[in-house]
């Protein structure tokens, strides 16, 4: 049974083994894409910013302004629908890939289609849990912030000269701090469910409630190790996230700098003194260069983000394996431990044990 700190080393070795053992960049990219898509299963944020304009609402200008506002609203609504559809598709595919990634890391699987077909039914249960958890967080946030938003609204109605009292400002600061705690708790619960409930569902096809019951027992018997696991996961996430950003920036520079320099040189040497046809060719060449740069950036992002996500999946599995013997046998068959640590009594509560 590995502690939260001891599981880092084997997880790093397993990540390199899964992604680099076959020495094929195509396979590395495919597995990295699986991991990157699995990371999107937690959901993501997107912003749609529409520039605002000041228009005169008089005569024909008022009608023109109304038409422009209606067109902008329709365009915004269409963009929102398209973005929402993309989000839902990626959210579903990412949630399903989270199950697939468990088999990829635990069993060293490289053929994805059979794994995808295997996890159709439990994916909807997992999505339901995440949606319910998100709605619960929204309800808590609304309950916390509603009184303060109402107070701010009342303060604004008194006029711009009115000032918020020191007690109200302190209460608002406390509410924001509590809001931060709620959001952190939400993500902590989400990661605990993903790291310690999904493997039970994937390996045993066990009900969701059984996985949650085992997670509760782990939290009850090893609260210190579970807190340390979450803390190390957060710290390692910052470190590996910074490393991934550096790799992404360097990757963009490798292709982006020559493309930008080439476009600049072409424009100043050919298009500036050439015909209209030459200018069109230069613009077309720059567009192709931009698309190549964008494709290369996506490729580098998938490769770097996939490595990070695969590592965290391996880290969760190695920490959980000593407390879940079935996973331990799948992950490291007897006699093949990375560290040769002295054996300890595995934590494996019987699935039929009644709740105390």
Image: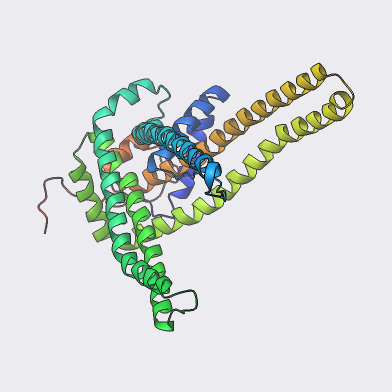
Q: Where residue 277 sits: x, y (%)?
A: 80, 16
For image coordinates 64% across by 45% down, the residue present is 246
Judge by depth and name the residue closer to the eye, 250 or 268: 268
The number of discs equals 0
Question: Where residue 64 appears, x then y in whole percent?
Answer: 53, 39
Residue at the farthest bottom position:
166
Return the residue nearer the eye: 234 or 128: 128
Residue 82 shows in the view:
yes
User: Vertical placement of 104 versus 250: above or below?
Assistant: above
State the quadrant of the C terminus: bottom left
Q: Is residue 125 left or right of residue 280?
A: left
Residue 138 shown left or right of residue 312 in the figure = left
What colour scheme has been applied to the protein in the rendered image?
A: rainbow
Q: Position of residue 182 (x, y in %)?
A: 35, 61
Evaluate whether residue 203 shows in this view: no
| Above or below: residue 44 compared with residue 94 | below
Left or right: 72 as drawn, with respect to 184: right
Q: Residue at x 34, y 55 (%)?
A: 186
Q: Looking at the image, is 288 positioned above or below residue 202?
A: above
Near-viewer residue (224 or 43): 43
Q: Residue furthest front?
A: 59
Q: Outermost residue, top direction?
A: 277
Q: Residue at x 49, y 78 (%)?
A: 161
Up/down of 207 relative to 119, above or below = below
Residue name at image x 56 percent, y 46 percent? 51
Q: Position of residue 105 (x, y in %)?
A: 41, 34
């Amino acid at each position: 049974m590995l502690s939260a700190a001891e599981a880092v080393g084997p997880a790093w070795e397993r990540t390199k083994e899964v992604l680099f053992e076959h020495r094929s960049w195509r396979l590395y990219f495919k597995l990295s894409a699986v991991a990157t898509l699995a990371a999107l299963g937690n959901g993501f944020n997107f912003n749609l910013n529409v520039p605002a304009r000041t228009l005169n609402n008089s005569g024909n200008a008022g009608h023109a302004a109304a038409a422009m506002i209606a067109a902008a609203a329709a365009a915004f609504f269409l963009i929102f629908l398209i973005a929402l559809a993309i989000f839902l598709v990626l959210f579903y595919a990412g949630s399903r890939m989270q199950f697939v990634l468990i088999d990829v890391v635990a069993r060293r699987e490289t053929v994805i289609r059979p794994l995808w077909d295997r996890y159709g039914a439990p994916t909807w249960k997992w999505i339901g849990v995440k949606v319910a958890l998100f709605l619960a967080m929204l309800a808590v946030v609304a309950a916390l912030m509603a009184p303060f938003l109402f107070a701010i609204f009342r303060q604004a109605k008194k006029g711009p000269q009115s000032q918020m009292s020191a007690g109200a400002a302190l209460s608002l600061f406390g509410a924001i701090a509590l809001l931060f705690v709620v959001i952190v708790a939400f993500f902590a619960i989400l990661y605990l469910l993903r790291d310690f409930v999904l493997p039970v569902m994937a390996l045993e096809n066990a009900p969701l409630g059984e996985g949650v019951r085992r997670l509760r027992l782990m939290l009850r018997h090893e609260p210190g190790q579970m807190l340390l696991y979450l803390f190390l996961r957060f710290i390692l996430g910052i470190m590996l996230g910074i490393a991934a950003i550096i790799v992404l920036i360097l990757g963009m520079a490798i292709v982006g700098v020559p493309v930008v320099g080439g476009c600049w040189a072409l424009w100043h040497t050919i298009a500036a003194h050439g015909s209209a046809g030459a200018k069109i060719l230069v613009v077309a060449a720059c567009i192709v260069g931009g698309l190549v740069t964008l494709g290369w950036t996506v490729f580098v992002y998938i490769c770097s983000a996939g490595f990070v996500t695969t590592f965290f999946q391996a880290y969760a599995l190695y920490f959980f394996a000593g407390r879940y013997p079935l996973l331990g046998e799948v992950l490291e068959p007897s006699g093949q431990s990375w560290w040769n640590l002295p054996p300890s009594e595995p934590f494996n509560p019987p699935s039929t044990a009644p709740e105390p």
